[in-house]
Amino acid sequence: MSEIKTVGVLGCGLMGAGIAQVAAMQGFTTIVREVEQAVLDRGLGRIRKFLDDGVAKGKVSEDVRTTTLANLSGTTTFDDLGGCDVVIEAIVENLDVKRAAYDALERVVGGHTIFLSNTSSLCITELAAATKRPDRFGGLHFFNPVPLMKLVEVIRGLATTDATYERVFAFAQALGKEPITAPDRPGFIVNRLLVPYLLDAIRAYEHGLGTVEDIDKGMKLGCGHPMGPFTLLDFVGLDTTYFIANIMFEEFREPAYAPPPLLKRMVLAGRLGRKSGEGFYKY
Ligand code: 3HC
């Protein structure tokens, strides 16, 4: 991966911070950009805490913590991303906001820079078309918690060249991840299977199949899942699940992807899961 040395990350929220951490841990010079210093500081703090906890658990060496933090810097400007060979965008799932960010990036980066989006549900071809480099654009979809989940999905847009795709796949491996190739269809591979399962769990609960606790226990202890569906829904975020489900339903028009009424109402009530303090469980 001699040609990719410097990695930019747009967004230092839960996913962006995890992605920046992984890139810095694997030896890439990594610059993460947030809109506001306070949000950036929170994200960088989360990375530091993960590394400190890792050292305390004996999972991360002191050396790795030191070099990771040395490889990592934060910024609130686009100018500092000018020298990046790859920029991974992990900002809000809104086409206009992403388009504005790509515009600003294109003003400062070189022609060789590859743009990657960590979107979980937006169309990669549409995002690529919002840039002047659709041939050097792809999807790189990570899973939460990014430093612990081995998988990453590599997605080609309609205009992504073979050369870009191959570089991105090798880059995903250089990040220490196990990449799989997924099509540019809503949900890619994992969410295409996971989201209908989560929606089905809500529907089943609405129809009286069992308590939230028992359904979770069933799938955890009966099937060896690390989290039951409701714990996972709260972990992913009910708003995120609702957003992805709507996009999948709009594209495929199949009932399996239709968000159940309870999910919509919980989102409307602000019960978004762990991040809001209440979802199917209280935190
Ligand atoms: N540094 C290094 N390693 C650490 C660490 C740290 N700070 N914290 C934890 N670890 C290690 C632990 O030592 C442990 O390693 P081991 O397996 O070798 O012993 C491993 O990570 C698991 O950590 P814990 O034992 O503390 O925690 P759990 O066993 O409770 O696992 C979990 C936590 C990994 C989150 C697990 O519950 C899980 O896999 N849940 C499912 C998550 C999932 O499905 N994510 C995908 C969501 S979908 C998505 O993201 C897509 C989007 O588009 C919606």
Image (cartoon, rainbow, N blue to C red):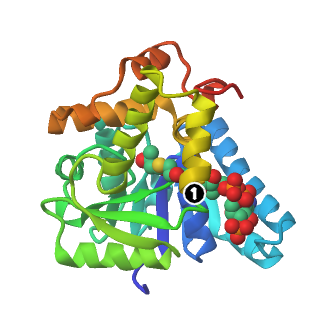
Amino acid bearing label 1: Gly
> Where on the picture, by quarter, is residue 281?
top right
Percent coordinates x, y for residue 131 in the rendering: 22, 51
Image position of 122 with respect to 66: above or below = above
Categorize mark 1 by other alpha carbons within 10 Å: few (<14), some (14-19), many (20+): few
Q: Is residue 253 visible?
A: yes
Residue, far right: 56
Q: Check the image and report above or below for 110 versus 5.
A: above
Q: Quadrant of the C terminus?
A: top right
Q: Pinpoint residue 249: horizontal percent, then vertical percent.
A: 22, 33
Residue 74 showing in the rendered view: no
Q: Residue 275, how many percent across, how many down?
A: 62, 31
The residue lying toward the viewer, choosing from 39 and 206, is 206
Determine which residue is flagged by label 1.
224
Q: In this view, does 211 lie to the left or right of 67?
A: left
User: Closer to the camera, 172 or 37?
Assistant: 172
Q: Is residue 102 left or right of residue 204?
A: left
Farthest residue to the left: give it. 158
Residue at 43 percent across and 84 percent down: it is 1
Q: Please determine whether, in this image, residue 252 is positioned above or below residue 22.
A: above
Identified at 57% across, 43% down, the residue is 218
Name the quarter showing ligand 1.
Answer: bottom right
Is disc 1 placed on a helix, strand or loop? loop
Compare residues 227 and 48 and report the one nearer the observer: 227
Please identify the quarter of the rendering in which residue 32 is found.
Answer: bottom right
Q: In the rendering, at what x and y percent does residue 74 appear?
A: 61, 54
Task: Kindly identify the residue that appears in the image at 71 percent across and 74 percent down.
Answer: 67
